[in-house]
C-alpha cells in the first residue's frame, strides 16, 4: 500500500457527519459505565488529533480489547459518526492501528506559520545588538555553528500539549521570549545585563530538542525527557560548551546556569530553583508570558473556527475565554 491520502480533517467534522479517516492518539482512558445493566463493563475515551485540531472519541463496545491494540502516539484508522456531547465528539465504530508505511506525518504535525528563516535572522540580529560580552557571544555562535543542533533547534516543538506544540514551536517561543526580555531591558537597563538576559532567553529551553522525539507524530517524550527533563538537560548542554572556554568568567557562567535552572519560576512548576537574580526573574516572566499568550491565542482560534462566543473550559489555563465580536469580524475579513 502507498501512503494514505487523508480526506477528512478534525476542523471540518460537524455533528451528523460520517467519519472515515486517520487520526493520531494523544490519550486514552477506560471508564466504568454508570448504568446498572452494564455494571463491570467499561467504555473507552480517546483524544484524537490531526494538524487541524483535536476531538474526543468514544468507543462503547469491546473497549478493553480495543484499548490493547494501540498506544498513545499511534496513528489509527477511525470510522464512526459525529455526535453532540458538550460539543462534537466521534462515536467510534471501528478503530485500527495504521501501518507506519501508510502515514504521512504532514497530516498530523502542525507547523509554525511564521518563516523559520526570518525568525533565525531576527535572533541573530538580537545577538549582534544585545550580546556584548565576548564569552557569551562566542558561546551562542558555538551552538549556531553546530549543524546538528541548529537543525534540531528549528524543528523542535516548544511543548507537547500546552504551548507552541508544533514543528518550529521552540524557535518561535524562544524568539518571543527574547523580544519580551528586550522590552524589560529597556525599562530597567541599570540592573539587567543584556548579554546574560538575551543569551538565557535563547538557550533556556534547548533541552527540549532532547526531551521530545521530533520524529514521533505527536512529539512523544524520550526516555531522557521523562527521566531527566529539559531544564536539567539544557543546563548540562550549556555548561558543557561553556566549560570548553578558558577564562570564561565564573560569575557569569554561574548566573547563566541559574537562569536556566530557575526559568519555570517555582519549584511546584518544575524549577529546581526559584529566580534569585533580576536577570533570572525577567527570564521567568518573559517565558511565562510567551507560553500563556500562545495558549490564549490557540484557544481563541479554535473558538473562532467553531463559532463559539465562549471557549470550552481549558484545563491548563483553568478558565473558559470570552471571544469578542470584533475577533469574529477580523476572522471573516481575513478569509475574504
Image (tube, rainbow, N blue to C red):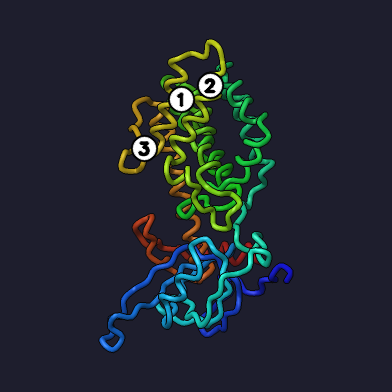
Residue at disc 3, secondary structure: loop
Sequence-first tag of 2 and 1: 2
The quarter of the picture where residue 285 lies is top left
Split into 4 quadrants, where in the image is the C terminus? Answer: bottom right
Q: Residue at x 49, y 64 (%)?
A: 71
The quarter of the picture where residue 144 lies is top right
Density class for disc 3 (Cα within 10 Å; few <14, some 14-19, many ≥20) is: some
Q: CA distance from mark 2 to mark 1?
A: 10 Å
Residue at disc 2, secondary structure: helix
Q: Residue furthest top?
A: 247
Density class for disc 2 (Cα within 10 Å; few <14, some 14-19, many ≥20) is: many
Q: Residue at x 42, y 29 (%)?
A: 259
Above or below: residue 265 compared with residue 252: below
Residue 137: x and y, percent? 59, 21
224 on left or right of 10:
left
Q: Are marks 2 and 1 in contact (CB under 8 Å)?
A: yes
Q: Residue furthest right?
A: 2
Sequence-first tag of 3 and 2: 2
Q: Is residue 120 visible?
A: yes
- Observer-nearest of 184 and 193: 193
Name the residue tied to disc 1: 256
Above or below: residue 258 compared with residue 176: above
Sequence-first tag of 3 and 1: 1
Q: Residue at x 53, y 76 (%)?
A: 95
- Observer-nearest of 33 and 9: 33
278 on left or right of 83:
left
Residue at disc 1, secondary structure: helix
Name the residue tied to disc 3: 271
Q: Residue furthest left?
A: 36
Amino acid at each position: 500500500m502507498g501512503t494514505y491520502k487523508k480526506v477528512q480533517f478534525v476542523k471540518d467534522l460537524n455533528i451528523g457527519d460520517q467519519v472515515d479517516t486517520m487520526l493520531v492518539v494523544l490519550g486514552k482512558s477506560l471508564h466504568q459505565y454508570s448504568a446498572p445493566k452494564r455494571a463491570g463493563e467499561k467504555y473507552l475515551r480517546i483524544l484524537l488529533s490531526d494538524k487541524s485540531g483535536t476531538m474526543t472519541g468514544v468507543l462503547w463496545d469491546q473497549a478493553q480489547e480495543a484499548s490493547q491494540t494501540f498506544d498513545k502516539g499511534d496513528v489509527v484508522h477511525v470510522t464512526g459518526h459525529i455526535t453532540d456531547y458538550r460539543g462534537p465528539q466521534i462515536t467510534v465504530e471501528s478503530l485500527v492501528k495504521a501501518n507506519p508505511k501508510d502515514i504521512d506525518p504532514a497530516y498530523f504535525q502542525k507547523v509554525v506559520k511564521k518563516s523559520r528563516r526570518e525568525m533565525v535572522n531576527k535572533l541573530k540580529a538580537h545577538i549582534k545588538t544585545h550580546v556584548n560580552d565576548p564569552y557569551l557571544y562566542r558561546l551562542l555562535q558555538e551552538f549556531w555553528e553546530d549543524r546538528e543542533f541548529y537543525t534540531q533547534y528549528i524543528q523542535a516543538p516548544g511543548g507537547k500539549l500546552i504551548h507552541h506544540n508544533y514543528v518550529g514551536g521552540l524557535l518561535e517561543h524562544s524568539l518571543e521570549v527574547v523580544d519580551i526580555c528586550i522590552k524589560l531591558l529597556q525599562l530597567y537597563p541599570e540592573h539587567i545585563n543584556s548579554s546574560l538576559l538575551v543569551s538565557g532567553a535563547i538557550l533556556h529551553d534547548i533541552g527540549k530538542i532532547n526531551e521530545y522525539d521530533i520524529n514521533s507524530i505527536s512529539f512523544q517524550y524520550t526516555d531522557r525527557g521523562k527521566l531527566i527533563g529539559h531544564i536539567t538537560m539544557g543546563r548540562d548542554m550549556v555548561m558543557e560548551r561553556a566549560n570548553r572556554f578558558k577564562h570564561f568568567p565564573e560569575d557569569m557562567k554561574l548566573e547563566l546556569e541559574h537562569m536556566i535552572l530557575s526559568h519555570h519560576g517555582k519549584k511546584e512548576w518544575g524549577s529546581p530553583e526559584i529566580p534569585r537574580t533580576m536577570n533570572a526573574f525577567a527570564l521567568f516572566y518573559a517565558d511565562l508570558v510567551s507560553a500563556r499568550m500562545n495558549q490564549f491565542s490557540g484557544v481563541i482560534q479554535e473558538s473562532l473556527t467553531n463559532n463559539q462566543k465562549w471557549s470550552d473550559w481549558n484545563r491548563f489555563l483553568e478558565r473558559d475565554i470570552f471571544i469578542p465580536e470584533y475577533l469574529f469580524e477580523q476572522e471573516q475579513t481575513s478569509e475574504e
